[in-house]
Image: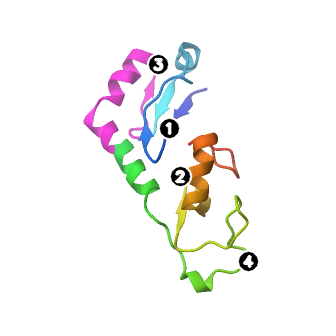
Amino acid sequence: MSSGYFPTYNFGRYEDSLKEYTKEIFQHGVVCGCTGKTYNTRPGFWAHTKTQKHQKWVNNLTSDANKVHISQKPNTYNSSHKCIICMESLTEQSLALPCAHTFHIDCINDWLKIKKECPICKTKI
């Protein structure tokens, strides 16, 4: 069964890292999110990460992650819209991760310095 590839989030920026992608993983195939293509070798995939299309995809992920996502005006948030990290109501200083879970920007940035995963669903970031 193939594994999906997603760049790591490091200090406000996505970057390519194959540390967690061993040769054994590539034997089963690694699917890149920018093209949906499956790669069966590390060197082949590493070469792909240097392509313009892949670099643009990673840059867009970084850009999207650093934008403030506001779904409602701050004064219309209710108790069901809380940052799970600090348990305070969300405001315009909120950020949605690629998995769509939303947190205060400062809270999630501090969290990601410690753990590179969503605090709710554990999706690697």
Q: Are marks 1 and 4 in contact (CB under 8 Å)?
A: no
| Residue 107 horizontal/vertical position (percent) | 61, 57
**Distance of label 1 from label 4 (alpha carbons):** 32 Å
User: For this rendering, which residue is in front, 49 or 84?
Assistant: 84
The magenta segment is 34-56
Dot 2: what SS?
loop
User: For this rendering, which residue is in front, 42 or 12?
Assistant: 12
Q: Are marks 2 and 1 in contact (CB under 8 Å)?
A: yes
Three-letter code for the amino acid on which mark 1 is drawn: Phe
Three-letter code for the amino acid on which mark 4 is drawn: Ser
Q: Quick check: can you spot residue 9?
A: yes
According to the picture, the residue beneath numbered tag 4 turns out to be 79
60 lies above or below 115: below
- Compare marks 2 and 1 and give the one earlier in the sequence: 1
**Distance of label 2 from label 3 (alpha carbons):** 25 Å
Three-letter code for the amino acid on which mark 2 is drawn: Pro
The residue positioned farthest toward the bottom in the image shown: 75
- Mark 2 vs mark 3, foreground winner is 2
- Mark 1 vs mark 4, foreground winner is 4
- Mark 4 vs mark 2, foreground winner is 4
According to the picture, the residue beneath numbered tag 1 turns out to be 6
Crowd rating for badge 4 (residues with CA inside 10 Å; few <14, some 14–19, many 20+) = few
Q: Which of the 4 image quadrants contains residue 91?
A: bottom right
| Residue 101 horizontal/vertical position (percent) | 62, 59
